[in-house]
Image (tube, rainbow, N blue to C red):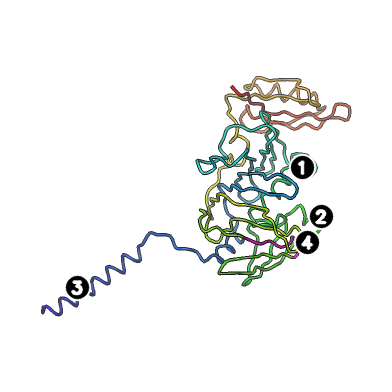
Amino acid sequence: MSQRKWIKLSLALGFILAGETFAQDPRPVVDDPVQAFKRQLGAERHVVLLVYTDYAPGTNPRHFAAACKGADFCIRELPGLDGINAGNPLDTKSSTPGMLLAGRSGNICWQINGNNVGQVEATPTHPYALHAEAMKMLLNGALNFGPQSIIPGSFHWNDNKFEAQTADALAKTAPQFATNTGAIRMEKGRVAELATRYSGTFRYKYDSNSRLPAGFPSEVLTQTSFNHWDTRIKYHRFEAFDESPVATSEFLPDRFIDPEKSVPTLVSNGVVVLEADSTNPEIVRRVAADVAGRSVSITNRPPWLAIIAGVATAAVGIACVVAKFRRT
């Protein structure tokens, strides 16, 4: 083979190898911000962690950490933002008294305040169920970049216009609002505004130094007066998967309780009437049945977290069992 042919062959082989190297470049592809924004709203995702601050008008800022998959969720109010980038702030086995810690898994609604855990099967009028619904609406606003009444992941896009499904609580009471529509407006290659038919209009700020995903705004702004917009939500962390197996326990109060420091306690009208041995939930069931005036079922979950809701007679009032865990 002549030297000239060998040089040509070497150059061709070099280009081929270079092409292979470029094709296998492991660096992530940078998403188009507008398409990433649409995808975030248009797909139900398993949100492993969302940390954000809510600036509700007339109140002090509140910091939250949350996780969700569909209708299942857990949300905890944080005393501050110190250490939010170290580990998962949801995984602490405790609750700060007076600070929100609540969730829902299937038809089980629950909440924790200090050392007390309350749980009940969801019914439309039970306080725990109403509280869980309110907290999910609050979380919806953060997941939807503003509108609380839309089901996350239900946005269907037609170019820059969308149609979305309204949360069940509103759709059942006002069927005419079951579907929401709207459009987005872009500036400088990013979504600057989202306008909805029934839920208002939202504007966005972006921080080029944030660790948020592509297309994810750093702040959501709402109009508080004529031509004046204030921050309503500020995002700090977001981690999610499009598809992943989810353990049921992720959205149950078990995640936040140390079983070695807990014991089922029967409370009737605010008075502790029995603090049972955590290994004998049958005692709790019988006493709860007596107080409530009818049989009360115990969930088939660990005995230390046997949390029972009993509907009492008018004379007796309400009885329920909470899992009370003691600090040491």
Q: Nearer the viewer, mark 4 or mark 3?
A: 3
Q: Residues within 10 Å of mark 2 (few under 14, many from 20)?
A: few
- Sequence-first disc among 2 and 1: 1
Alpha carbons under labels 4 and 3: distance apart: 68 Å
User: Which label was assigned to residue 177?
Assistant: 4
Alpha carbons under labels 3 and 1: distance apart: 75 Å
Instruction: Please identify the quarter of the rendering in which residue 98 is found.
Output: top right
Instruction: Please identify the quarter of the rendering in which residue 84 is found.
Output: top right
Q: Which residue has dot 3 on it? A: 10
Amino acid type, mark 4:
Phe
Q: Is 208 one of the magenta-colored residues?
A: no
- Sequence-first disc among 3 and 2: 3
Q: Quadrant of the C terminus?
A: top right
Residue 295 picture location, percent across and down: 77, 29
Q: Secondary structure at mark 3?
A: helix
Q: Which residue has dot 1 on it? A: 123
The answer to which of 230 and 312 lies nearer the viewer is 230
Amino acid type, mark 2:
Thr
Amino acid type, mark 1:
Thr
Q: Residues within 10 Å of mark 1 (few under 14, many from 20)?
A: few
Amino acid type, mark 3:
Ser
Q: Which residue has dot 2 on it? A: 173
Q: Secondary structure at mark 1?
A: loop
Q: Is 199 one of the magenta-colored residues?
A: yes
Q: Secondary structure at mark 4?
A: helix
Alpha carbons under labels 2 and 1: distance apart: 16 Å
